[in-house]
Amino acid sequence: MLKIVKDNVASLREKSELVTLPLSKEDENLLKEMVSYLKKSQDEKYCQKHHIRAGVGLAAPQIGVNKRMFAIYYTKEDEVVEYGLVNPKIIQNSMKKVALKGGEGCLSVDEDHSGFVYRYDKIVMKAYDVVSKKEVLIKAKGYDAIVLQHEYDHLDGILYYDRINKKEPNKEIPNSYLI
């Protein structure tokens, strides 16, 4: 089972290194294991048995590997969103911002940090995906864009609470909306 690095560990604040492609078997297997971890974490009984929290995203730095890769897994409506992304890059973004009403959380952060985390409402991300075994161009909006940007931040040593306005954590900003 993967061990989650907590936010008091210095390596979580480091910028991650690009991953060499074609992907090594070791990196491919690690990313597959990260996706598997997320799937299992969404089973309540599994979480209780193994004393873990549910998650929808997991970046390599969160398991002590400072490489530019992360996994995403969740269902919305009848759709499964599943990626194992290598060297992701945001190549386009909207001016409009979005935030979760209830704030964000993180597997590496045990203490609650309330406040709005504003992110781009729409992004286009380019990466190699281990799940589909090809280069992908992901067009994401709203919640999907938030999840991708949250994990992307981990690759640059940024945690979600770094993006909360310290003086006015629940301040709504112009050209934004809450979901």
Image: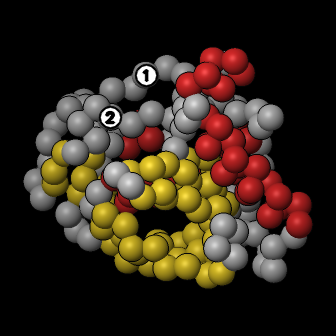
Q: Which amino acid type corresponds to the residue marked 1 in the rendered image?
A: Asp
Percent across and percent down for residue 1 are 80, 34
Q: Secondary structure at mark 2?
A: loop
Q: What residue would you read off at disc 1? A: 112
Name the residue at 69% across, 18% down: 49
Name the residue at 38% across, 59% down: 145
Name the residue at 44% across, 41% down: 160
Structural crowding at the residue carrying mark 1, measured as other residues with C-alpha within 10 Å and reported as few (<14), some (14–19) or many (≥20): few
Q: Is residue 148 above or below residue 43?
A: below
Percent across and percent down for residue 37 are 69, 41
Q: Nearer the viewer, residue 7 or 43?
A: 43
Q: Secondary structure at mark 1?
A: loop
Q: Which amino acid type corresponds to the residue marked 2 in the rendered image?
A: Gly
Structural crowding at the residue carrying mark 2, measured as other residues with C-alpha within 10 Å and reported as few (<14), some (14–19) or many (≥20): many
Q: Is residue 142 left or right of residue 163?
A: left
Q: What residue would you read off at disc 2? A: 103
Q: Nearer the viewer, residue 133 or 138?
A: 133
> Can you tell which mark lies on residue 87?
none
Q: Is residue 143 above or below residue 5?
A: below
Mark nearer the N terminus (2 vs 1)? 2
Q: Is residue 74 above or below residue 68?
A: above
Q: Is residue 3 left or right of residue 79?
A: right
| Residue 146 makes an appearance in the image | no
Is label 2 in contact with label 1 (beta carbons under 8 Å)? yes
For residue 40, what is the image quadrant? top right
Q: Residue furthest right?
A: 25
Percent across and percent down for residue 91 are 44, 78
Chosen colour scheme: secondary structure
Q: Residue furthest front?
A: 78
